[in-house]
Image (spheres, helix red, strand yellow):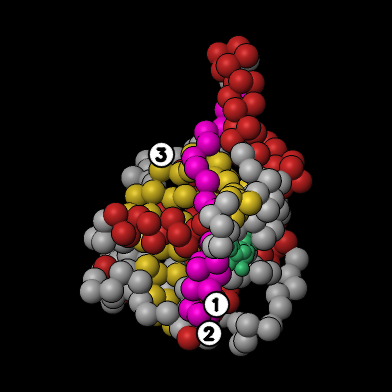
Amino acid sequence: MASTSQDLALLRRLSSISHLVTVLSGKGGVGKSSVSVQLALALLADDPTLRIGLLDVDLTGPSLPRMLGMEGRDVHASDDGWVPTGGLLACMSIGFLLSSSRESVVWRGPKKNAMIKQFLAEVRWGELDYLIVDTPPGTSDEHISLLESLRPILAPPSPSPPLPTLSALLVSTPQALALLDVSKELSFVRRTQLPLLGLVENMSGYVCPHCGDVVGVFGQGGAEDFCRREEERKASTVEGEGGGCAFLGRIPIDRELVALLDDVAASGAPEAGAGADTDADADGDTA
Ligand code: ADP
């Protein structure tokens, strides 16, 4: 089938990314966006020279601009595509294209599909070590569009430019209800053959500031048990196929995180990666 100019633009953009991580959750409100941001910041803390992009494909509930203190900022269009907001930690979200954070997006699938394709083909990230993609909860139109756009990574055309590694990171709270939805997300990951990094348990207990006891607000250890069962299932299947989900760790409920995110949202954050090159143009996306 003949390639369209958008397909070619998409391949060109993808070829300038080394690793693409999609962050998924079965349920909303479990901390997928906060984990996406924390993952980006943790990578930068480990190596401040990394170039990291955060793409928000949650079209109806974009929260990255607010979490990064970038709400109200504009992205500008250049001849070579949209220039994302931010510096070393660059972000693109539909939130930057809306006139206000109260505006809602009421779109059918095809329009969402076109927007996501545009995000992947027309954002001028420059060379990126990581593109972290924050998705809506569940398995929606956005996921299907995203996976369609990323198909060249799973089934590269011939000839193909170098393409990023692709992986999925699941986020859940320890709650049984949230984990039930993780099973569905896991089934989606397997059906679409997305390589799975594993599962993070967020909001895993709360350390009481008065007595130091850990209170399991949403229960505790549920995600680890879930992963253990998945690993056992994997071990019991022929050639270990169709199962397995690594437990990646737990993040407690953190009052400071809530306060920080609220402060950042209220005041506007400084550029992440302070001291580093903060000019999005400086990456020289000339491919
Ligand atoms: P999702 O992307 O899954 O909808 P968010 O990342 O937007 O979830 O998180 C929902 C809310 O919970 C946000 O207000 C966020 O600040 C808060 N939150 C997420 N993780 C934690 C945590 N570990 N401790 C405290 N608050 C958290």
Give neighbour class at mark 3: few <14, some 14-19, many 20+ (Cα, 10 Å): few
Residue at point 63%, 43% (across, down): 220
Position of 90 with respect to 240 (left or right) is: left
Element type where label 2 sits in the image = helix
Q: Name the disc covering residue 209, or none.
A: none
Q: Name the disc covering residue 266, or none.
A: 2
Q: Estimate the x, y position of residue 32 in percent, counting from the top left.
A: 58, 57
Q: Which residues are magenta?
A: 242-266
Disc number lying in front (3 or 1): 1
Amino acid type shown at disc 1? Asp
Quarter of image, res 182: top right
Mark positioned earlier in the residue sequence (3 or 1): 3
Q: Is mark 1 within 8 Å of ligand 1?
A: yes
The answer to whether residue 67 is above or below residue 209 is below
Q: Estimate the x, y position of residue 44 in percent, counting from the top left.
A: 32, 60
Question: Looking at the image, can residue 222 be seen?
Answer: yes
Mark positioned earlier in the residue sequence (2 or 3): 3
Residue 255 within the magenta-colored segment of the rendering: yes
Q: Please name whichever residue, 190 or 179, is drawn nearer the observer in this view of the structure.
A: 179
Is disc 2 in contact with disc 1, using a CB cutoff of under 8 Å?
A: yes
Residue at the spot of label 1: 262
